[in-house]
Image (cartoon, rainbow, N blue to C red):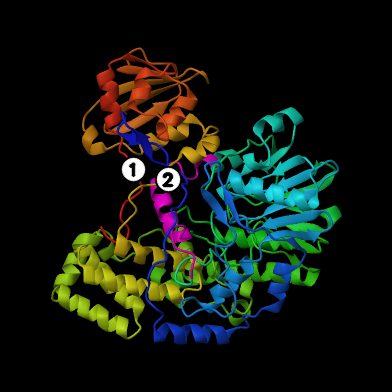
C-alpha cells in the first residue's frame, strides 16, 4: 500500500486502505441463456447442498451480531446486514457453487469450537480466535481493522465474560490477521502487563514491507480482486471466497516480544501448552501453525482453508511454492496428532479424526497435483496458457468441495507454477520483444478490417456465448481506441457474463469491477494511507527510502547529481541519499559534509509527510523540521520523485 504524497516533494511514498464509498446498485446485464444453462449444469454436477459443511458452519453457534460497525466519525466499517440477500437458490447471475460458499460464509457470530476454544467469524475477512487461559483470553489473530476487532472482542466478552487479554498470537504476516491488534489491546498495556505477543520469525519485516514498495499497483489491483467498491447484490459482490469482504478502518500492529524461530517450538501461554510448527513460504512468507495437545486441537492458520487457496494472488504478489505448501500439508498429518478438531483462521472447523485426515489429504493432494501436472506439461512443451487450459482436477478431488476454486483456481495456480519455474518467457522468439498493448491493439483492429468489423466479430462471439473470445477481441479494440463507447459497453457485458459463470470470487469480482470501470471510468482518487499510521510507525526508514528510490523519474533526473542528508532527530538516525546515473542510493551513515542540503525531522512528522498528513507549509514552518543548505536543491531533488496516485487505468490504456 504505497504512494508518495507530499505537496512540496511533488510525490508521495505510501498508500493504504480507505473506506469504500457507498455504491448504488449497478444496472448490469441479466444472465444470458448460455450462462443459465452452464450454471444449471454446475448445480447438477455436485451435491451443493453439502449437509456436512453446513452443519459444521453452524456447529457451536452462540449468538449473531446485528447492525453495523462504525468508526469514530460515524462512517460504516462493517455492515452485518449487507449480505442478507444470500439465501435460497442461487440467482441466475451467480455460479451455484460460489453461491454455496457465500451461504456458508454467511454464518457469522460467536461459535464454540470445543471446551476452551471459541471463534468470532464474519466480522471481517478472517476469524478472531479466543483460547481460554488461566487468567484471561489468548487471542489468535486480530482481524484487519481496529474497529472490527474491538467489536469482535466486545461481542465475545458479552457472552463469555470480561476477562483481560493474556496473550496475542499472530499466525502470519498478512494484514487481515494483525491489522486490528490495537482494537484488542493497546501497546501500552502490552508493556505494562508484560503480555506475550507471539509471531513467526520475520513477521515484522514481512508485515510492514509487503506492500510498501509496490503499493500503488497492488492497492489498485486489490480493488479489482476484492470488489470492495461493488454493490452488495446478486449482480455485484456476494463473497470473497475466504470470507465476505475486507474491513476498511484504522490499521495497526503490535511488535512481537516472543518470536517462534525454530521448526518446532513449544511455548506455554497463560497455562496453555502450544506447539508451534514453522511453515514459512507456504501461504505467507512468515507463518506458523500450532497444536494444542492438551485441548486435542490443531490450528492450521491460513495454510489450510475451506477453499483452494492462491499459489499466485491476482492482486499481484510474489509467487508461492506449491511443492513446499504440499509438503507442509503432508507433515501436518503428523502434527495434528490426537487432535479432534482442526480450526483455521478463515472459515469453519473440521471435527473428527477421520474427517480431519481426509480434509488435509485432499488439500495436500490438490496442491501437489497442480504442481506435478504443471511440471509434467512444461516438460512436454506447453506454455503457461496451454497448461492452464489442459489441467483438470481428478474427480476424487473435484467432488471434495473444500478444494474448489472459490479463492484460488486451478487455472491461475497452474500458471503460477509455470511462472515460478520458467518466468514470463515461453521460449517462442516472437515473444521476446512483442508489442505493448496499444500498438498491438491498433494493428489487430487494422488487420480485422477496421473498428466496425472488429466490433461485429466480437458481437457475433458474444451472441454465440463465446464470452472469452469476445473479451479477447474487444480488448484489442478498446486498447486501440479507449473512446469507442460501443466496444466498451460490449466488453462490459462480456465481462459480466464471465463473472456470472465464475466459481471463483477472485475472478467474479475483477470481471465486475472491470465492467463498472468500462462504463464509469477508473476511480478519481487513490487510496489514502493515514489509516495505517499505527502500523507504519513500526516500519524501518529503509523501506520508505527504497520506495522513494523506486519512484525516481529517471528521464527527469537525467545527469543530475545530488546528495541529501536526511536526519531523524528523535530516533537518532541519519541517512545519506545520493542521486547519480539516474539511480538513487541510500545509506544509514553520518551526515555527509558535502551534501547539497540537510533535512532534519522526526519520524512521526516524516510519516505524516509521506501519508499526506503534512505538506509544504508544515515542512517549512514546523518545529519538528529544519532545512540546512540549498532549499532549491532539496526541492529539485524531491521534484524528481514521481507521485503514484493509484488511479491508473486497467481495462483501457
Give percent across and percent down for residue 254: 63, 37
Q: Spatial distance from mark 2 to mark 1, Cα to Cα?
A: 9 Å
Residue 215: image tag? 2
Instruction: From the viewer's side, name the closer residue of 596 and 255.
Output: 255
> Taking the image as drawn, is residue 265 in sight?
no
Looking at the image, do the residues carrying marks 2 and 1 touch, with CB atoms under 8 Å apart? yes
> Taking the image as drawn, is residue 169 in sight?
yes
The residue at which mark 1 appears reads as: 644
SS at badge 1: loop
* Residue 229 included in the magenta stretch of the image: yes
Residue at 58% x, 46% y: name it. 145
* Residue 230 included in the magenta stretch of the image: yes
Give percent across and percent down for residue 353: 80, 68
**Residue interval drawn in magenta:** 208-233
Give percent across and percent down for residue 426: 35, 64
Residue count near mark 2 (Cα–Cα under 10 Å), binned few <14, some 14–19, many ≥20? many
Give percent across and percent down for residue 93: 46, 77
Q: On the rendered image, what quadrant is the N terminus found in?
A: top left
Vertical arrangement, residue 43 with respect to residue 421, above or below: below
Instruction: From the viewer's side, name the closer residue of 346 and 228.
Output: 228
Vertical arrangement, residue 43 with respect to residue 438, above or below: below
Q: On the rendered image, what quadrant is the C terminus found in?
A: bottom left
Residue at 52% x, 72% y: name it. 373
Residue 151: image tag? none
SS at badge 2: helix
Residue at 44% x, 27% y: name it. 606
Vertical arrangement, residue 343 with respect to residue 70, above or below: below
Marked residue nearer the N-terminal end (2 or 1): 2
Instruction: From the viewer's side, name the closer residue of 514 and 425.
Output: 514
Residue count near mark 1 (Cα–Cα under 10 Å), binned few <14, some 14–19, many ≥20? many
Is 429 on the left or on the right of 608, as rendered?
left
Amino acid at each position: 500500500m504505497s504512494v508518495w504524497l507530499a505537496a512540496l516533494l511533488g510525490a508521495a511514498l505510501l498508500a493504504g486502505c480507505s473506506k469504500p464509498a457507498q455504491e448504488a446498485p449497478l444496472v448490469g446485464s441479466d444472465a444470458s441463456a448460455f450462462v443459465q444453462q452452464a450454471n444449471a449444469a454446475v448445480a447438477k454436477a455436485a451435491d451443493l447442498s453439502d449437509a456436512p459443511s453446513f452443519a459444521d458452519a453452524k456447529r457451536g453457534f452462540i449468538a449473531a451480531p446485528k447492525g453495523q460497525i462504525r468508526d469514530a466519525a460515524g462512517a460504516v466499517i462493517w455492515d452485518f446486514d449487507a449480505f442478507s440477500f444470500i439465501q435460497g437458490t442461487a440467482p441466475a447471475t451467480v455460479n451455484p457453487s460460489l453461491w454455496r460458499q457465500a451461504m456458508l460464509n454467511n454464518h457469522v457470530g460467536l461459535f464454540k469450537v470445543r471446551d476452551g476454544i471459541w471463534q468470532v467469524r464474519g466480522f471481517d475477512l478472517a476469524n478472531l480466535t479466543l483460547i481460554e487461559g488461566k487468567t484471561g483470553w489468548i487471542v489468535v489473530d486480530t482481524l484487519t481493522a481496529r474497529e472490527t476487532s474491538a467489536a469482535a472482542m466486545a461481542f465475545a466478552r458479552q457472552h463469555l465474560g470480561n476477562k483481560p487479554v493474556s496473550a496475542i498470537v499472530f499466525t502470519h504476516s498478512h494484514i487481515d490477521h494483525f491489522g486490528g491488534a490495537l482494537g484488542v489491546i493497546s501497546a501500552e498495556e502490552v508493556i505494562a502487563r508484560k503480555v506475550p505477543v507471539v509471531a513467526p520469525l520475520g513477521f515484522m519485516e514481512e508485515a510492514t514491507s509487503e506492500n510498501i514498495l509496490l503499493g500503488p499497483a497492488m492497492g489498485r489491483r486489490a480493488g479489482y480482486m476484492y470488489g470492495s467498491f461493488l454493490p452488495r447484490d446478486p449482480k455485484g459482490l456476494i463473497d470473497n471466497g475466504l470470507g465476505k469482504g475486507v474491513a476498511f478502518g484504522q490499521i495497526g500492529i503490535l511488535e512481537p516480544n516472543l518470536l517462534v524461530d525454530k521448526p518446532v517450538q513449544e511455548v506455554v501461554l497463560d497455562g496453555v501448552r502450544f506447539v508451534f510448527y514453522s511453515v514459512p513460504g507456504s501461504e505467507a512468507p512468515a507463518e506458523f501453525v500450532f497444536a494444542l495437545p492438551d485441548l486435542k486441537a490443531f490450528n492450521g492458520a491460513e495454510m489450510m482453508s475451506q477453499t483452494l487457496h492462491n499459489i499466485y494472488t491476482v492482486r499481484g504478489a510474489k509467487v508461492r511454492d506449491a511443492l513446499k505448501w504440499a509438503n507442509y500439508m503432508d507433515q501436518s498429518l503428523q502434527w495434528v496428532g490426537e487432535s479432534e478438531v482442526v480450526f483455521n483462521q478463515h472459515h469453519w472447523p473440521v471435527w473428527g479424526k477421520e474427517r480431519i485426515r481426509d480434509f488435509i489429504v485432499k488439500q495436500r493432494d490438490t496442491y501437489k497435483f497442480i504442481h506435478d501436472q504443471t511440471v509434467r506439461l512444461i516438460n512436454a512443451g506447453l506454455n503457461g496458457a496451454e497448461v492452464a487450459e489442459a489441467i483438470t482436477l481428478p474427480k476424487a478431488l473435484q467432488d471434495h468441495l473444500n478444494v474448489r476454486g472459490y479463492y484460488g483456481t486451478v487455472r491461475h495456480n497452474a500458471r503460477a507454477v509455470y511462472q515460478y519455474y520458467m518466468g514470463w518467457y515461453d521460449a517462442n522468439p516472437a515473444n521476446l520483444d512483442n508489442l505493448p498493448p496499444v500498438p498491438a491493439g491498433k494493428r489487430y483492429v487494422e488487420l480485422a478490417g477496421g473498428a466496425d468489423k472488429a466490433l461485429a466479430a466480437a458481437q457475433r462471439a458474444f451472441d454465440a456465448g463465446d464470452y472469452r473470445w469476445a473479451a479477447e477481441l474487444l480488448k484489442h479494440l478498446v486498447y486501440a481506441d479507449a473512446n469507442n463507447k460501443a466496444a466498451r459497453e460490449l466488453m462490459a457485458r462480456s465481462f459480466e457474463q464471465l463473472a456470472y459463470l465464475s466459481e471463483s470470487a477472485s475472478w467474479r469480482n475483477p470481471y465486475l469491477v472491470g465492467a463498472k470501470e468500462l462504463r464509469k471510468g477508473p476511480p478519481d482518487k487513490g487510496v489514502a494511507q493515514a489509516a495505517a499510521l499505527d502500523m507504519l510507525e513500526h516500519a524501518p526508514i529503509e523501506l520508505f527510502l527504497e520506495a522513494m528510490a523506486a519512484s525516481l523519474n529517471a528521464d527527469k533526473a537525467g545527469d543530475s547529481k545530488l546528495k541529501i542528508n536526511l536526519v531523524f532527530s528523535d530516533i537518532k538516525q541519519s541517512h545519506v541519499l545520493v542521486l547519480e546515473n539516474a539511480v538513487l542510493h541510500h545509506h544509514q551513515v553520518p551526515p555527509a559534509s558535502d551534501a547539497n542540503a540537510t533535512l532534519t525531522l522526526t519520524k512521526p512528522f516524516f510519516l505524516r509527510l509521506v501519508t499526506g498528513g503534512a505538506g509544504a507549509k508544515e515542512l517549512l514552518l514546523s518545529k519538528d523540521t529544519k532545512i540546512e543548505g540549498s532549499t532549491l536543491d532539496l526541492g529539485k531533488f524531491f521534484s524528481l520523485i514521481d507521485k503514484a496516485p493509484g488511479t491508473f487505468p486497467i481495462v483501457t490504456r
